[in-house]
Amino acid sequence: MRHYRIQRGAAAVAVIGLVVASCGGSSDDTAQDAVTTEAANDAPVDDEPETPTETDPEPDTGAATDDTSPEVADDEPDAATGEPVVEDDSDSDAAVGEGFGALPPATGEPIVLGMVNTEGVAGLDFPEMRTDTELAVAWVNEHGGFGGRPVEIEHCTAAGSPESSQACAQELVGKGVEMVMLGLDLFPGYDTFTAAGVPVVGALPVLPPDYTANALFFTGGNATTMAAMVALAVEEFDAQSVGIVSADNPGANGSEAALIAALDKAGVPYNSVKGGDNETDAGFEGLIRQANDGDPDLMISLYADAGCVGAMRGRVSLGITTPMVSTAICGSAEVLDVVGDDALGWYFVGVGETQDTVSAMELDEIIAPAYGENAEATLGLGALGITQLMSLARVANNLAAGDEEVSGAAIYERMATSTDILDFPNDSPLECGRSEAYPSICSFGFPIGTYGADGAIMTVPGFELKSVIDYLP
């Protein structure tokens, strides 16, 4: 399912929260992470399919934008004017033209980008961000590049320390890159990049300073994900109280803090219960029972991967029917294939119904050389790298369509000021700077889905792309 794959890439980011928290420094450094939440639980049940581990990623993300050439009907003239009727084709990238497929190979002057990514460190090893970004580079260079300019990337590997990130910043500035992309970098050298006039964009904010940094991020991390949960609680369930289950570790506590801040802003009381990183079936039943004490209108699980399985089974074993919401990683095929209809009554932030769009088909082409038919099971954090590179290509093509200069600085400026460009491949609007409290975030919309009796995830009506602006603390 194409739409599911990218969301999976976004949910994979959820795992980063726990990893960053446990390996990346003080508690202040661990509050905000990726698109979902935190830690996984490894309590597989004998005789059941193997449950996912906390390194299995989900995504989160997508968009569209290049040109605007809506399709004209051939034989349906307007009855009053006799003129052809312009139709909005929802099954194509109508807001941004026909995508990249018809564009010729890029042959202009190359645009050299830098990329900082953390690799080779225990618990902080994300090479797929680099390798999948290179898949997108190879594909886009055969389909227009960045506004006709072929893309080249200078990579630098950080080691999860301020010193290594700063060394990368100095190295890339010295190489004269036009823009820097952040893969997963805990301590970006923002001051160095700013002093050199090199614009910085990122896949997602990892730590709290990222939200106010001199940079732009394609996703909003914990801040927007937790706000989406609260939006569902308020608008779908009119929740007067909420129960929360989560692990008691730095990553989980950061996710919980973001959730509680959004609940407090919305005026929704909560009962939060903490468990271990790894719980038995009985342990999950105890957590669910405590969180359901007082008959809340909704429960929220901040567990991931195997923790999703344990929480889903625990709720069913207790006969509890209170609906539950989690991050997108609990809506992954790896989890749902294990729990089946135990997922009835669960809602997933960042997961909607499959959509067959031009963007989704282009994503298939991008990943085919490396993943082939196994993409649904294997595409993870690298989806964020693809989203970042291809979304920047759309911004560059927007500049080229207006006969404007295509440069790193121009792309950054257009991204920062435009409201009519969509990200790739989910076609979410880029609205950089819309939130004063989180000026670096550019995306505020989430699909929210629920597991149906037919075994598929269905989008909740009204939550096809729910804006969380009003729920950000």
Image (cartoon, rainbow, N blue to C red):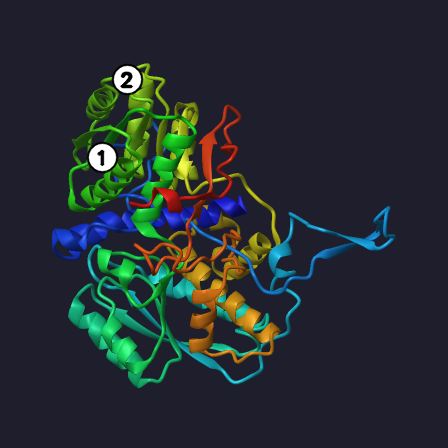
Q: Nearer the viewer, residue 282 or 412?
A: 412
Q: Is residue 45 visible?
A: no
Residue found farthest to the front:
80
Marks 1, 2: nearer the viewer: 2
Q: Nearer the viewer, residue 468 or 50?
A: 468
| Residue 99 falls left or right of residue 293 | right
Q: CA distance from mark 1 to mark 2?
A: 18 Å
| Residue 78 falls left or right of residue 402 | right
Q: Is residue 443 visible?
A: yes
Q: Is residue 14 above or below residue 148?
A: above
Q: Quadrant of residue 44?
A: top left
For the residue carrying disc 2, how many other residues have a C-alpha within 10 Å: few (<14), some (14-19), or many (20+)? some
Q: Amino acid at mark 1?
A: Ser
Disc 1 marks which residue? 246
Q: Dot 2: what SS? A: loop
Q: Amino acid at mark 2?
A: Asp
Disc 2 marks which residue? 295
For the residue carrying disc 1, how many other residues have a C-alpha within 10 Å: few (<14), some (14-19), or many (20+)? many
Q: Nearer the viewer, residue 434 or 424?
A: 434
Q: Position of residue 344 (x, y in %)?
A: 43, 24
Q: Position of residue 177 (x, y in %)?
A: 37, 81
Number of marks in the image?
Answer: 2
Q: Tags 1 and 2 in contact by the CB under 8 Å rule?
A: no
Q: Is residue 318 above or below residue 200?
A: above
Q: Nearer the viewer, residue 346 or 197?
A: 197
Residue drawn at x 28%, y 34% as measured from the top left: 307
**Quarter of the image containing the C terminus?**
top left
Q: Position of residue 433 (x, y in %)?
A: 38, 60
Q: Position of residue 458 (x, y in %)?
A: 51, 33
